[in-house]
Every structure is written in C-alpha cells, then in structure tokens.
Image (tube, rainbow, N blue to C red):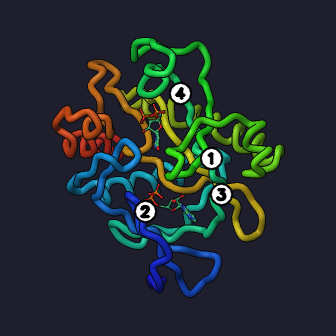
C-alpha cells in the first residue's frame, strides 16, 4: 500500500490517504513537543521506536480482546491503520500520581492508588485540551453514552494488560493517554499510539523515568530512555 495525499500533519505524526478509502498510513516523526506545543525539539530515533512499539502494543491488546486500528507495519516509520473518526476525548488512566494530577491536587508524585483512575480531556488544541466530564462530553455530543461506556471498559482493560506486561519487564506503568475512534463501519476501536510519548514508565527498581518526561523536564538521556524501553519490549 502506498502513501497518497497527506491529509494531516500533527505534532508527532503525518497521516496519508491510501487507495483504500477505509485505510490510512501514519508516519512517525522524531519531532517532540510539550506543554501544548510551547516546547519543541527532536528526539533522534523516536519515530522508529514509537511506530514499532505502538504496533507491538496494539497487537498484544488485540489478542487480549481490545479492538484497535492496527492493520500492518509497512516500514520503520510507517504503518497502515483503519481510518477512524477520532472521538475528541483524550482518555487518561493513572495507577500512580504524577504530572498534572500531582499539580492539580497538590500531592507528591509516586503515590500508588488502590484503584486506577480515569479522566477525560477534550481534544482541542485551541482550548488547550481542557479536562471534561462525561456529562459535558454528552452535552457537546462528542460521543454517545454507550460509546463512552465502551471506551471506559476498553481503557481499563488496556491498563490491566499493559500494567502486567510492563511489570514483567521491570517497568511500572504510571499513567497513559489513549485515543479511540469510530471505524467506517461504526465500531469503536483503540487508535493513535501507545509509546513513551503517551505513557509514563518508571523503572520498577530505581524509579528512573523512561519516557517523555525526560524531554519535558530537561532531565537528559532522552534518546537513551526511549531505547531502553524498546530494548525491554524487544526481548
Ligand atoms: P496531534 O494531532 O495531537 O498533533 P499526532 O502528531 O500524533 O497528534 O497526529 C496524528 C493524528 O492522527 C492525531 O490527531 C490522531 O488523533 C489522528 N489519528 C490517529 N489514529 C488515527 C486513525 N486510525 N484514523 C484517523 N486519525 C487518526
Ligand atoms: N498525555 C499525552 N498527551 C497529552 C497529555 C497527556 O500523551 O496531550 C499523557 C502523558 O504522557 C502522561 C499521561 O497522559 O502519560 C498523563 O498526563 P498528565 O495529565 O499528567 O499531563 P502532563 O503532565 O503530561 O501535562
């Protein structure tokens, strides 16, 4: 399958049409942004790692009963996916306090929760992806009640699968962001990506950060962290 017209260029990926109207090609870049695009940079090799890693995670999740947009990896940076209409909600699951949760509620990072939490942000760059609740999402007709229920069920299932998988690699899954979409035949599937750009990973022994926080917070060793996560999942 070949790339036809570029439909969209986002912060981390480009999206292309294909000869099949139900399929797209996503192409992963090394560009990195943080704080709603305010901080910009390059993480050398990130596109290749995120592409391959995301595809591995999507295949694992399919096996565990979560439908995804994944079709076929085409090259180091390019993957064929089902075209979906993205539900404009960023779905965030947390197992341990960090990032905006710690800031918002004034608690330290690293507190393990008894139960995972879920929250939604309205995916809208102009508004800065504001936090939104299910009633507001329904009022804005971003999804139906049934779709939101299904998205929550899938999101917690993703957490169960990935938490266990990463722990077996000596990595704590702190939190992550998911996006879901509706296929041309009306099915809700997991879309976008699962990578160190969209998850927080801490080494289970040292608590060393192995994710995009190294870029956001200027901690150094950004490329090495992405490579380390990729090395562990490739074993
Ligand atoms: P952003 O738009 O936030 O800058 P990216 O650079 O990752 O993000 O761009 C990829 C875009 O493609 C995102 O807007 C994402 O929602 C969208 N997307 C991901 N998977 C699919 C899919 N299967 N079908 C249609 N759009 C998708
Ligand atoms: N996240 C993401 N995209 C976003 C916002 C958050 O992938 O636009 C991920 C982020 O990498 C982290 C989780 O979602 O794994 C929770 O992020 P948080 O709300 O703490 O926000 P942040 O600290 O990144 O501003």
- Marks 4 and 1 sit apart, C-alpha to C-alpha, by 16 Å
Label 4 CB sits under 8 Å from any ligand 2 atom: yes
Q: Which residue is mark 2?
A: 10
For image coordinates 29% across by 29% down, the residue present is 209
Residue drawn at x 62%, y 37% is 120
Q: Earlier in the sequence, mark 2 or mark 3?
A: 2
Residue 138 coordinates in the image, percent (x, y): 79, 44
The quarter of the image holding the C terminus is top left
Residue at the extreme front of the image, as rendered: 126
The answer to which image quadrant residue 152 occupies is top right
Label located before the other in sequence (2 or 4): 2
Q: Residues within 10 Å of mark 3 (few under 14, many from 20)?
A: many
Residue bearing the label numbered 3: 181
Q: Quadrant of residue 205?
A: top left
Mark 3 CB within 8 Å of ligand 1: yes
How far apart, in angstroms, are the residues tagged by discs 2 and 4?
25 Å
* Cα separation between marks 2 and 3: 17 Å
Say whether residue 62 is visible.
Answer: no
Precedes in sequence: disc 1 or disc 3: 1
Q: Secondary structure at mark 2?
A: loop
Indicate yes or no: mark 2 CB to ligand 1 under 8 Å. Answer: yes
| Residue where numbered disc 1 is placed | 89
Q: Tags 3 and 4 in contact by the CB under 8 Å rule?
A: no
| Closer mark to the observer between disc 4 and disc 1 | 1
Q: Earlier in the sequence, mark 3 or mark 4?
A: 4
C-alpha span from label 3 to label 4: 21 Å
Residue at which label 4 appears? 94
Residue placed at 43% from the left, 21% from the top?
103
């Amino acid at each position: 399958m070949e790339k036809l017209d570029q439909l969209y260029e986002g912060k981390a990926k480009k999206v292309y049409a294909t000869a099949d109207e139900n399929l797209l090609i996503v192409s992963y870049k090394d560009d990195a942004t943080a704080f709603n695009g305010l901080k910009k940079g390059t993480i050398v090799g990130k596109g290749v790692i995120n592409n391959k890693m995301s595809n591995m995670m999507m295949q694992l999740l399919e096996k565990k009963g979560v439908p995804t947009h994944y079709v076929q990896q085409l090259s180091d940076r390019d993957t064929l996916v089902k075209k979906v209409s993205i539900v404009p909600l960023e779905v965030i699951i947390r197992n341990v306090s960090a990032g905006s949760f710690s800031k918002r509620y004034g608690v330290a990072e690293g507190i393990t929760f008894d139960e995972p939490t879920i929250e939604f942000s309205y995916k809208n760059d102009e508004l800065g992806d504001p936090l939104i609740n299910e009633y507001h999402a329904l009022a804005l007709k971003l999804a139906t009640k049934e779709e939101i229920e299904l998205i929550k069920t899938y999101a917690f299932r993703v957490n169960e699968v990935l938490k266990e998988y990463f722990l077996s690699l000596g990595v704590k899954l702190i939190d992550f962001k998911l996006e879901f979409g509706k296929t041309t035949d009306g099915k809700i599937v997991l879309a976008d990506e699962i990578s160190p750009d969209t998850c927080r990973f801490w080494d289970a022994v040292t608590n060393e950060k192995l994710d995009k926080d190294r870029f956001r917070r200027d901690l150094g060793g950004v490329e090495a962290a992405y490579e380390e996560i990729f090395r562990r999942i490739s074993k």
